[in-house]
Image: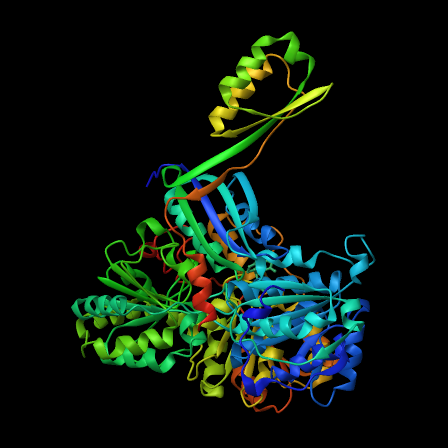
Amino acid sequence: MNEEIKSFTISIYTENNIGLLNRISAIFQRRHINIESLTTSQSEIEGVNRFVIVVNITESQAKKIIGQFQKQIEVIRAYYHTEEQTIYQESGMFKIKSDLLFDEPQIQNIIKESNARIVTVNKEFFVLEKSGRRNEIESLRRDLNIFGIMQFVRSGRIAVTKEEMKITEMLLAFNNQ
Amino acid sequence: MKETQTMETSKTDIAQTERICGSEAIIKCLIAEGVDILYGYPGGAIMPVYDELYKYRDEIHHVLTRHEQGAAHAAQGFARISGRVGVAMATSGPGATNLITGIADAQIDSTPIVCITGQVPSHLLGTDAFQETDIIGISTPVTKWNHQVTKASEIPEVLAKAFYIAKSGRPGPVLIDITKDAQFGELDFKYEKCTGVRSYIPTPKTNVESVNAAANLINAAKKPMIVWGQGVILGEAEAELKAVIEKTGIPSAWTIMGASAIPTSHPLNIGMVGMHGNYAPNKLTNECDVLIAIGMRFDDRVTGDLNTYAKQAKVIHFEIDPAEVNKNVHADVAVLGNSKDSLSQLLPLLNENTHIEWLQEFKDLYAIEFDKVIKSDLHPTKEGLTMGEVLKEINVQSKGDAAIVSDVGQHQMIACRYSEFNKTKSNITSGGLGTMGFALPAAIGAKMAAPEREVVAIIGDGGYQMNIQELGTIFQQKVPVKIVVLNNEFLGMVRQWQQLFFDKRYASTEMTNPDFVTIAKGYHIEGKRVVKREELADAIKEMIASKESYFLEVCVEKEDNVFPMIPSGASVSDIRLS
Ligand SMILES: Cc1ncc(C[n+]2csc(CCOP(=O)(O)OP(=O)(O)O)c2C)c(N)n1
């Protein structure tokens, strides 16, 4: 029963209520599952939130944990997907000394080649933003690290799924009951 | 609250609004939900509500327990015997945290209770104010739902939702934390019962194909076996289960939480599964060809080692909670839904049948268990009294009509093994959490919810002292519960494990006990102590005959063990008789 551990993206549609994050994270914590990344935002439906959580677990764990989410009163619906079933991105921000732009001409090439975007520039620092897969952001970080990065931050994964999730239909069905 | 727009309102429900304060609204909500008894303990942050309870004391009876844990367990006992929602109330901080054990117990045993806690005024939240504790954070993992109310106007809707969620689907505990300013604040009161929450599907629809598939497997089975759990009692599917069993002739066993759904004397009732269950159903779990699980969740105390559990069998799982399906045991057929509905759909599809030879295998193994265990438990020839003979005598004197409320330990296993139940909802015990201290307060709640029933609490000398203060509640409220303490001067179950698995190193399991009868008398509860077999029958007779509460201490053999036993982590096949 040595099932493969894979990266799963868990999407949870919920009511927008205080305390729900706590309930959701407790479900991972109780099963000793480490959260690789967690993002929460408004979803496509007014008043409905969406959690996108990345965890490395087995598929049978994923199935069971979805059942636990679904069982929470304010969870409308939960899903798990493999990487192939989603389109996903992360975003990284880099704060770098402005002098380097002029002292290290190489940096300009790095920026161009990486498709990173300059968010702001002032006398002391400039800020780069790069969206993409984790490895793209990581490789940019490695390249820039040589020159020194003042601050770096990377967001959690955001993902949309290839398959439809039919949350609106589900909510309509309730209203028409 | 986002659900406002989603709550359905039946036209007849719409009452005129009236301007009242939050604390009065709380009482009115309780009354609207049919609550006439609640259990609790006052304190600063809940005082406005107690003030209203005083005003409404003719309509709603508040029972002052001696500890908030007692209030939570009493609410559980109330719910377990009646199927109604039990209510407990406490102040903020320590009052609220004292409820937690009962809430956790209700969560794992699917008991519908609503707990209302007071909270510091909303402007003090997060300031480490006096008796402020994050009870929402603390209770989150052990509640079906919880919610903090900071405005009076939210009270009716939140409480309506609380009762709906606690009772519907797979029941469970709900905690509502209400800040003191919300209790003092005013609102235009109008109560509408909650009939739905859009993100919550209490009972999944039963799929016709799954019922057909289940029926086909059952009809073709040569050696089918049913194991039912509390889902049958919670779904009030006792009659449906009985019909299924009798039509198909399938030998049927129960988990500790399912006890009493079918009378003990029923010829197809083959006893309890699990660690201290009966020999035959445990052993034959690994012989059956189709295992039909109904409203049970394959707890590890039932299955033992999962890798050697019923591997040869096709498993059919009737279950209301989709998260339980395939959680521990793979289901070849899962029938989702409420047990009453799914069993009613199943019944007409089943062929009439008998399984005489297969049933005989259970009887043969029972004979072995009788010889090796039951005989000496129920008809001992040694000098010391056994727990089993006490239970046997209670069965005789109560004619099997009593509700047995057991605590946790050896006496609990003996009570569940040997009680003879005629009526459903008669076995009230802490199954999932195994909470010592449960029985005495739970018996109070049970007796108050069903005053017409004989309620007998069976408690060990250890667990008794975990909530012994509730004798005060019994005395003050004049609750005629019967209390039996089976005193072995040990934390018996732990001592048994020490004997069997730790070379008899009795670390901190020996108890030097007080004079229990004197303590009971201190609370003006009549009591007796039995040390000799000759005194037992009369004492139990006197106890059952008593119109008031009665305390009976029976001094039993100190180092008896409970068998059969599946050692923890072993296979059900490796069940030991000694
Ligand atoms: C609150 C709590 N603490 C500890 C335990 C662990 N435990 C399980 S059974 C048991 C012994 C119970 O002793 P007693 O109440 O005297 O009953 P007996 O087993 O002797 O019948 C203990 C300590 C528990 N179940 N609950």
Of B128 and B389, which appears nearest the observer?
B128
Residue B75 appears in the figure: yes
**Of residues B113 and B374, which is closer to you in this image?**
B113
Horizontal and vertical percent position of residue B232 = 40, 74
Residue B360: quarter of image: bottom left
- On screen, B317 above or below B35? above
Q: Is residue B160 left or right of residue B385?
A: right
Q: Residue at x 55, y 57 (%)?
A: A46
> In this picture, is B102 found above or below A70?
below
Residue B381 visible (yes or no): no
Toward the viewer: A8 or B242?
A8
Position of the C terminus of chain B, as image quadrant, is bottom left
Q: Nearer the viewer, residue B108 or A148?
A: A148
Classify the position of the N terminus of chain B by image quarter. Answer: bottom right
Total numbered labels placed on residues in the image: 0
Give coordinates of residue B535: x percent, y percent: 55, 83
Image quarter where ligand 1 lies: bottom right
Q: In this figure, which colouring scheme has been used for the structure?
A: rainbow
Q: Residue at x 34, y 53 (%)?
A: B571
In the depicted structure, whether residue B349 falls above or below residue B213: below
Q: Position of residue B310 (x, y in %)?
A: 29, 56
